[in-house]
Image: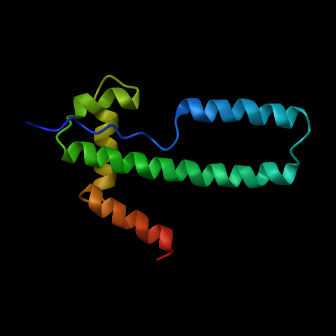
Amino acid sequence: MTEPAAEIRAPITEADVLAWLEETAQAVRAHAVPPAELIRLLGELRRASAACADASDWVLLAAREEGASLRQIAPVFGKGYVRAPAARLEKLHRQALNSEQWLDILRQRASGV
């Protein structure tokens, strides 16, 4: 008997971001957030965006390693064809052959190596 598949949740969701954005927009409209704080926030969001893109790339590699087809993956890219994920995989494979190598690259970046 096989164990049921584990559900792994993303650390942040689209709904989380939208709720945060609505709350933050209210604070900005009320002039409760100084420009310096918005600039600091902009930097943090740009770094978080890059981290999400790196995580997305890792999941793409891992999904392929676990047997997901490009046709299964394609709808996540917002297209009904496999060109988008195939192109992304090709670009990733220039740097890493598998998800473990990609994770190693991310660790090195984080440590400043």
| Location of residue 71 with respect to 41 vertically, above or below | above
Report whether residue 102 is seen. Answer: yes
Tally of numbered tags: 0
Where residue 66 sits: x, y (%)? Answer: 19, 44
Residue 75 image-quadrant placement: top left
Where residue 30 sits: x, y (%)? Answer: 90, 33
Where residue 8 sits: x, y (%)? Answer: 36, 41
Left or right: residue 73 versus residue 113 is left
- The residue sitting at the left extreme is 1
Viewer-closest of 77 and 59: 59
Residue 83 image-quadrant placement: top left
- The residue sitting at the bottom extreme is 113
- Quarter placement of the N terminus: top left
- The residue sitting at the top extreme is 80
Residue shown at 34% from the left, 46% from the top: 59
Left or right: residue 34 versus residue 44 is right
- The residue sitting at the right extreme is 31
